[in-house]
Amino acid sequence: MKEYSACTTILVGKKASVDGSTMIARNDDTFRPITPQKFIIRPAAKNESGRKIKSWLNKFELDLPENAQAVPAVPNVDYKNRGYYDESGINQENVAMSCTESTYGNERALAYDPLVKDGLDEDCMQSVVLPYIHSARNGVEYLGKLIAKYGSPAGNSVLFGDKNEIWYMEIVTGHHWVAQRIPDDAYAIAANRVSIEQVDFADTKNFMWSEGIQEFVADHNLNVDHQGWNFRHIFGTYSEQDRFYNTNRVWYGQKYFNPEIEQDPTDGNLPFIQRAAKKITREDIEFVLGSHYQNTPYDPFGKGTEEERHRFRPIGLNRTQNSHILQIRNDVDSDKAAIMWLCIGGPTFTPFVPFFANMNDTDPSYNNTSMEYNLNDAWWYYKSLAALVETHYPQFVQLDTDYLNELNQYYRHRVHKIIEIAGDKSGTELTSYLTKANQETVAYTRKRSEKLWAQMMIDSINMSKLTFNMDENL
């Protein structure tokens, strides 16, 4: 049986961000709390014939092009049982891709275009697209052709970004999809249901779609509205799960970015495209991805009633295997502009570490993850750190908050200094320098994390219930 993921996506246009960056971000939430992942570089290919990929989830296989760009990837360690799931990366042309956000079409549409059992599934999707595309728009076009040829075995949404544009593509049946360009001055949040609303088929600058989708909808009487062509209404769901598992996550994210707007967390018609009350920082995205309804009755760690504290699914989960923000900057040279902010332990309690995408390797603590518990591995270490914070949340949350704030200050300064020191380095010299700088950032993060770990362990010992007050001389 396939174990579906249930992720949360945030997309931010370049005029909506504080520094002119585009940012696409997602929590990779899996079915199980323990699904070890590693962070690696998949090497470039040049004139290499006979390259193939075969899914471990179904019978899908594909002959790969002879040439491919090098790309970072965050795959499962146990790929033979779990599938590859490269998850996220930025290629050598500064095109970012993250897949997928599990998205569910309704039974009316699926009745006429059912899912394709052995089609292109999400375990291979990142691998067969990102190394071969040249822009965010080209990513949608490239994947769209693959879906037309092979079909899709699941509903999936895919994020694409470059320095100018962000696209969100929703594949909802075996062959049909729509993609929307996020306006430069806007943000969008998606959480496991069809998000795109009104589609303007005359506006090819901001929308793309599968061939024949309009005829498909008309032929099968799928448009439920009197006017317009609302993709969510036609293909989406409005279930009990949506109201208590999905829409509430969008509600909280929009509440954070637009506190002036009053909305119902179970409203199935929350808007997809929004303009934030202020410009969005990377730290804002990190907070939302790790959030659990802070300052509302629905916080599992809060003061609401028992029912309120367990009413909605939080955004940050213990089964978030990694969280990432793929940032393409517009204020620096292109060979230093792409940064993968990777949180390998869970975004609520552990840091998003910056990795310049122009690298030729990752740190051994990231790229050699064991299936067995091993604190030398970043994945296991930061998962354990998060679990330790949660065990005594009231006592440890401020320590953890101070730790994350301190690291974010360090990261901002460090990214600035790395770019400054890089100067006029280019080519392989620059790649080697940025690779080494990434590994030094990893080492500092681990050192600072050990300090927090030690403090929490000491405090835990002092909080033991196996104690008794008595004369100190006895």
Image (cartoon, rainbow, N blue to C red):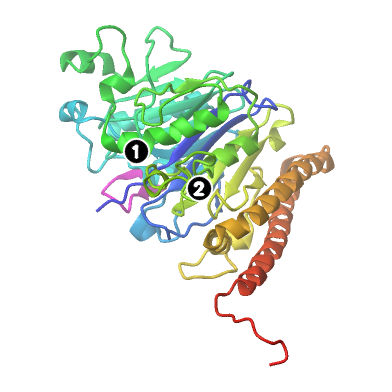
In this rendering, would 403 be left or right of 216?
A: right
Q: Residue at x 42, y 16 (%)?
A: 207
Between the residue at mark 1 and the residue at mark 2, the CA separation in whole angstroms equals 18 Å
Picture quadrant of residue 471 = bottom right
- The magenta span reads 46-63
Q: Which residue is mark 1?
A: 244
Picture quadrant of residue 63 = top left
In this rendering, would 143 be left or right of 351?
A: left
Q: Residue at x 74, y 51 (%)?
A: 437
Q: Give the SS element for disc 2.
A: loop
Crowding near the residue tagged with mark 1, few <14, some 14–19, many ≥20 C-alpha atoms within 10 Å: some
Amino acid at dot 2: Gly
The C terminus, quarter of image:
bottom right
Q: Residue at x 53, y 18 (%)?
A: 183
Asked whether residue 63 is in view, the answer is no
Amino acid at dot 1: Phe
Point out which mark residue 451 bears: none
Above or below, 141 against 60 in this view is: above
Asked if residue 332 lies in the magenta stretch, the reply is: no
Q: Which is nearer the eye, 264 or 29?
A: 264
* N-term-proximal mark, 1 vs 2: 1
Above or below, 256 against 71 in this view is: above
Give residue 98's position: percent from left, percent from top: 48, 38
Q: Which is nearer the eye, 311 or 44?
A: 311
Give residue 147's position: percent from left, percent from top: 32, 32
Asked if residue 48 lies in the magenta stretch, the reply is: yes
Q: Which residue is mark 2?
A: 302
Give residue 143's position: percent from left, percent from top: 40, 31
Residue at the bottom extreme, as displayed: 474
